[in-house]
Amino acid sequence: MREKGAKQAVQARLVDRLLIRWLAGRVGATAFVSEPEPRMQGLYARGKQMLAGNYLLAGELIEAPGRVPFSAETLSAQEDLHGFGWLDHLVAVGDLEARKLAQSAVQDWITRFGRGAGPGWEPGLVGRRVIRWVAHAVFLMQAMEPEAQRQFLTALALQASFLERRAARTPQGRTRIEAHVGLLYAALSLEGWEARIQPASEALLGAAHAVVAADGSIATRNPEELLETFELLAWAAQSLADHTRPVSSKLLSLLDSMASALRCLRHADGGLARFHGGGRGQEGALSAALAIQTTLGQAQIVPTGNAAMGFARLAAGRSTVIIDAAPPPLGAAPARAHASTLAFELTSNRRPLIVSCGDGREFGAEWFRASRATASHSTLAFEGYSSARFSTQRRARLELSDGPRKVGVEFRHAAHARTVALSHDGYINSHGVEHLRYLDLSVDGRVLSGEDMLVATTRAEKRRFDEVMARSGQTGVPFSLRFHLHPEAEPSLDMNGTAVSVVLPSDEIWVFRAEGLHLSIAPSVYLEKGRLKPRASQQIVLSLRAAGYTTRVNWSLAKAHETPLAVRDLAQDNPLAVPRL
């Protein structure tokens, strides 16, 4: 089946190349009808790194002084280069040196790849590139030679014509939306393309509704992917409004729903929960996209809810707890899903405390596989097992094929606390027990109390548990509770190993305790996008054994009494971040 898919992909690529060659010389553009305003959030520090010749792309560091290196070893890095997302960072710098580098890179790309050569002609990638070329056209064309301007406009029209014929054939998902947004950007901006605006707008709406549910969620359950999709649709809606074109009420309603979901998935520090392959999101991107959504005509600011896209949220004071409260997306994204059901993250003020290890895709196959295991998340896991399992088929060994089917979620808020009761059945087949978790966040956000239970209730479950117990020699089935800490959180054992004090850069002190249990601190990692290597971190571990049909563990994580209610947090995060290695 995979061989057939690969053959079809090769054939589609050949058809695309023939289409591009046929279009070349038949299409063109002479001018822009408007000066679009860029909505992207570039990073000044990243732009300065590029000017120094350092390109950090998808975990690959490329040194190329004075030029943009369109050749890269990994496919992800090639996509980053040919998608021109790095252009946002040069625009953030905005000086003459940055403009010259951007202009020379565009000319180089047109010369080498403008007639269909190279890896940059997937419709979604073309859409991403067109969005940047149009959005940054003023920056790129300033002081550009007339012949270079003509080549730029011709190349832009060629790519837009390609999208007009290929966008609808892009695989369903964010890449299809990207292709349609690129086409809409071109139709709004290029002279002679006015008649294409309405069809492009309608096609985009159809692509959006195929990906985003009415409640603003996406099937992959990746918060960062939801943000990227939200950005694309917000940019498109704002561009239509800027050109005095009607913005569909259906699109505005969809943006409202997505904004509500993203607010639920946002921690107190502004970063997104890191689950199912997603990172925190680029700094400032979510705030900028939400600002666009709130300024559009019919957009509504919806209060932050308790749940979205299969995640539950507890918030009080300046603390947020976000829990993966649904089965992993085995159908929509089996190759990216994580075995993270009932794992949680905790952020206090602007400092992450309890985290997930993150996604290891950029650090190689071994890190990628390990990062998706339950042990890489802040939850309970049996020794050697995850709550979801990888496929045993050779061709699909990186896909999750089995996991929790039933996940219970019940909020029990009271005047003194925000509480959620959760459960999943991911260990019933393997161990005969259900995992129950109760999380209780005090109304001032200073105490998070938890209870984890393993329960076998039916005869079949008890029989299965007895079989597992017999294999353990009746000594109990080993399991662990893990609480992964952010790299900037510094833990230390106190009170003869019965408590762990964790100090944050803001000088907040949190104390972890578990009733009558001995604690340990073990090494962990923090897998962060945009770095060459994993960051070393630590984790609090409770190593236990389940010896009966019911096993209960109570624990708490509370701010120390000397920690003030209002924290004056002046420490800087990665000042200039040059380079983030």
Image (cartoon, grey):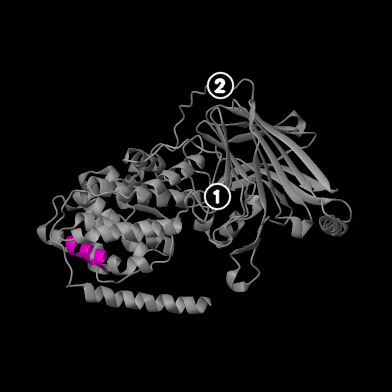
192 versus 580 height, above or below: below
Q: Specify the label residue 275 is tagged with.
A: 1
Q: Is residue 128 visible?
A: no
Q: Quadrant of residue 317?
A: top right
Mark 2: amino acid? Leu
Could you tell which of marks 1 and 2 lies nearer the N-terminus? Answer: 1
Direction front: furthest residue: 249
Q: Is residue 580 left or right of residue 363?
A: left
- Looking at the rendering, the stretch of residues picked out in magenta corresponds to 152-161
Q: Is residue 526 left or right of residue 152?
A: right
Mark 1: amino acid? Phe
Q: Is residue 227 visible?
A: yes
153 in the magenta segment? yes
User: Residue drawn at (41%, 49%), measured in percent from left and top?
Assistant: 254
Count residues near mark 2 (Cα–Cα under 10 Å), then give few for <14, some for 14-19, many for 20+: some
User: Residue drawn at (53%, 47%), measured in percent from left and top?
Assistant: 274
Question: Residue 419, image x and y in percent?
Answer: 65, 35
Q: Is residue 520 left or right of residue 476?
A: left
435 in the magenta segment? no
Mark 2: secondary structure: loop
Question: Residue 338, image x and y in percent?
Answer: 59, 55
Cα–Cα span, label 1 and label 2: 30 Å
Question: Residue 367, image x and y in percent?
Answer: 57, 57
Count residues near mark 1 (Cα–Cα under 10 Å), then give few for <14, some for 14-19, many for 20+: many
Residue matched to label 2: 565
Question: Residue 58, image x and y in percent?
Answer: 44, 56
Q: Main secondary structure of the magenta part?
A: helix
Mark 1: secondary structure: loop
